[in-house]
Amino acid sequence: MAGTVGTIRPLTETDRPEGASASWDGVDSERVAHEPWLAVGDEEPAADQVARRTALGARSGYQLHERSFVAADAHVVADRFVLGEGSFVAAGCLIRGDLTVGAHCSLNAGATTIGRVTIGDLVRIASYAVLVGENHVFSDPGVPIAWQGLSTKGVVIEDDVWIGAHATIVDGVTVGAHSVIAAGAVITRDVAPWSVVGGVPGRLLRHRRSPRPGVGRRDVLAQFDASVAAQWTAVLERCHTVDEDADTYLDAPGQEWGPRPLNDAVEIAGAFGEVPPVASREELVARIQDTQDPVTGLFTDPRTGPPDEPLAATDREWDMYGIISCGYALEVLGSGPAHPVHVVEQCDAGRLEELLDGLDWEWLAWGSGAWVDAFGTAIHLNRRHHGSTRTHPMLWGWLATHVRSGSGLWGERLDPAGAWDLRWLMAVNGYYRTIRGTYAQFAVPLPHPKAAIDTILAHCEDHGWFEEEERNACNVLDVVHPLWMLSGQTAHRGDEIRDGAARILEAAVGDWVDGEGFAWEARRARPGLQGTEMWLSVVYLAATVLGEAEGLSWTPRGVHRLPPAGDLG
């Protein structure tokens, strides 16, 4: 048996735990080659290791820290190799291509890196894991794959990652910091920080910072339900005001009057099966109906009046959103618009195509989707309350032919522009608004559901599921509703969707302010009616995804109701 390596002394009887076998009497070179952590920090490394490191360091493109370790029978044939302080490469490893390893990392026995691989600090790579930072080109079926060359995107492993035995990470993947890759997993897409991923192909098993759904969350949801059931009336009372001798609501105390808060109050009360106490049901219906222009059928804000060009996309949000806000509030009250939305009913196919083509789906996908949402809602209102039979086939045909098969969305991922770095945010929010008033409204299956799920989950991970970044009611609602709807069409990545819904629910219930409700921009703004109505819908949707909504004291009605309005038959 070879002698002891470096300054590590042989074990003695006093080192051995009581009752342990006496079958191992020291730390020899063979053991160190397979368990280099026993020697990597030695102040006096063995002579053969110094010689090994010196010989490797002499190669062009190689940089090995003086406190690193490379086993003698590790196969290092890389074009470039950087090994940081306290890091080691154990026996049987194969290092090819271009490898950069940070500090205090381990490549255990038999691990392999191929192509361009970058590893951060404090990374643990178990035996026989394979990191493949290149790929064969096989796009031309008329040419043998062996002759088509290689492409390289590279693999990136961020800090504090544990990769299990026999796992494979393929080219183009980034594994986020603090993540765990289960043994045998095949990772084909990026892994968000703090994830536990396993399976073939790899899927999210859970988030390390969020426990899996369980009794604890159900208890929290029950406590939250009791609070909102007892306090929703106080939330409305806090926002009560008198405008022109009529009792009504502001979004929050001190805010400017507008037409939306009364409708939000109707929906909050309606979710609990009640009517806001400022007026009778009949009076509330009359008030909202009186805001409808009988000529266009649009609902107008008295502060701005009717639009000059009905249906034209402008920055006057209420011109189209009034259809949604007022139309659904009237339905919650058991009524509907007094007049058809004439501008939608009379819109012919040519004009509709012109309007759709004129929307800015690249940079303003949210606004474009909001326009479609209002148009689709008007179709529903006209059909349900005024006997219309129009379905506007141009709308459905345009949406079917303009959706992007790769992402499942109508908008595009945006590159950073100055201080703005929206990434998928505009496109995903626009996706929700597009499908809410159309596909969800009429129970029409969504196109490319798996691609849409992949895009939305990537967007959620990109923003940490909005637990801190971009945390407002729109951003969260605009992912949980589509994921709920899409999961009804396919089981694709269902565990990840449920895990994300748990994160959303657990974070949301913690934002409730007793007696005041929810702020639209959680933790940064004053609670108000819009935030309360939207976040209650978020919690209900997340609970529905998790199968835990039954028995809750409220059910979203109006804009954010779950059941469709009907079909187009």
Image: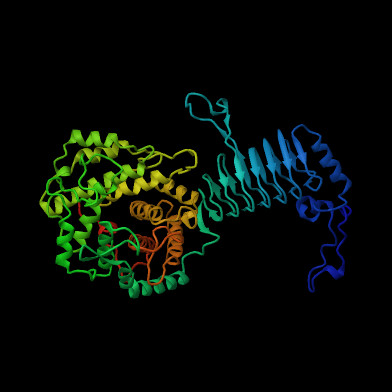
User: Which quarter of the image is occupied by the N terminus?
Assistant: bottom right
Q: How many labels does the image show?
A: 0
Along the line of sight, which residue is nearer the eye, 1 or 562? 562
Residue occupying the point 49% across, 39% down: 416
Report whether residue 563 is seen: yes
Residue occupying the point 61% across, 43% down: 156
Dividing the picture into quadrants, the one containing residue 173 is top right
Figure colour scheme: rainbow
In the image, residue 504 above or below residue 51: below
**Image coords of residue 112 (percent x, y):** 66, 43
Dividing the picture into quadrants, the one containing residue 162 is bottom right
**Image coords of residue 225 (percent x, y):** 37, 72
**Furthest residue in direction left, as rendered:** 387
**Image coords of residue 507 (percent x, y):** 46, 63
**Furthest residue in direction front, as rendered:** 244
Along the line of sight, which residue is nearer the eye, 553 or 315? 315
Report whether residue 451 is seen: no
Residue occupying the point 40% across, 44% down: 426
Q: State left or right for residue 310 relative to residue 118.
A: left
Along the line of sight, which residue is nearer the eye, 445 or 326? 326
**Image coords of residue 353 (percent x, y):** 23, 35
Dividing the picture into quadrants, the one containing residue 391 is top left
Q: State left or right for residue 16 relative to residue 385.
A: right
Along the line of sight, which residue is nearer the eye, 389 or 167? 389
